[in-house]
Amino acid sequence: MSSGEAGPAPRLRPLESIEPAASGWRHLPAGELASRLMTSRPSADRPCLVAIDGRSAGGKSTLAAALTDVTPSAAVLHTDDLAWHEPFFGWAHLLEALLKQVRSGEAVRFRPPAWPRHGRAGAIEVPSGLDLILVEGVGANDRAVAELYDAAVWVQSDGTAARHRGIERDVASGENGDRAQSIAFWDEWDQHERGYLADQRPWERSDVIALGTPSDPVPPGHVVVAPGPGRGTVPGVGRA
């Protein structure tokens, strides 16, 4: 499948059968996707703000890195930093406060309230003058903040592949203990995540669907995307 050429639907296990299968998949150079996303902002006076949502370990960070690598003036914000020591999916108010600040295009230094309470130094810092800001993480495209974005991407992934990837990543980092502890944490998190996504249905607000767990080779520097059912603000990709 060459750049921009439509291809067959990937083999995916949908989320509890409620996540619709995307169609019209194609390879795009990451730089081309970044350029198309940036056309969704109404003015060059402020950064283009894009949500990248999807399952845990489904490829969100990988996509965000691919887009920033080809965009000279870009930054990634990770919802994990907002969710740190907060209730599962109980931090949309913090995301809203952060997004309202970064939309201005000015430099931002945002310190979530849990950080000083639990001894975490530093802050979430965003420089001024950026063209593109990507907000990646499960819950990035929460219904409460959807209107603050210029565009949104849903990273569709195979649930089995994402689970394996996530557990192996956690075991390697030791973040959640040994293998047994990592599996137990994953299962607890997954229960909350599935309920949250079933309620929020962020794919319905996404302009682009990206494939996070490709089963076939992808050309270097390319991403696999399909139109999403969102606002249709991304030319050549959304809407389905």
Image (cartoon, rainbow, N blue to C red):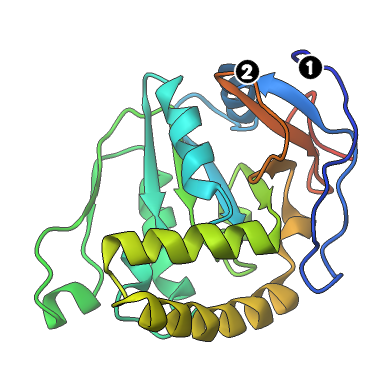
Point 46% across, 66% down: residue:
167
The residue that label 2 is drawn on is: 32
Between 163 and 101, the residue placed more toward the observer is: 163
Task: Give the image quarter of residue 194.
Answer: bottom right
In x, y percent, where is residue 221?
A: 55, 19
In x, y percent, where is residue 36?
A: 65, 24
Distance from disc 2 to disc 1, alpha carbons, whole Å, reads 10 Å
132 w.r.t. 92: above or below: above
Left or right relative to 93: residue 116: left
Secondary structure under tag 1 reads loop
**Label 2 CA crowd tier, 10 Å (few <14, some 14–19, many 20+):** some
Left or right relative to 161: residue 14: right
Examine the rendering and report whether any part of residue 205 can be seen. Answer: yes
Which of the labelled discs sits on residue 171, or is there none?
none
Q: Answer yes or no: do the residues labelled 2 and 1 have beta carbons within 8 Å?
A: yes
Which of the labelled discs sits on residue 4, or is there none?
1
Position of the C terminus, as image quadrant, is top right
Between 232 and 82, the residue placed more toward the observer is: 82
Q: Amino acid at mark 2?
A: Glu
Point 9% across, 76% down: residue:
119
Q: Amino acid at mark 1?
A: Gly
**Label 1 CA crowd tier, 10 Å (few <14, some 14–19, many 20+):** some
Between 117 and 197, the residue placed more toward the observer is: 197
Between 52 and 66, the residue placed more toward the observer is: 66
128 w.r.t. 80: above or below: above
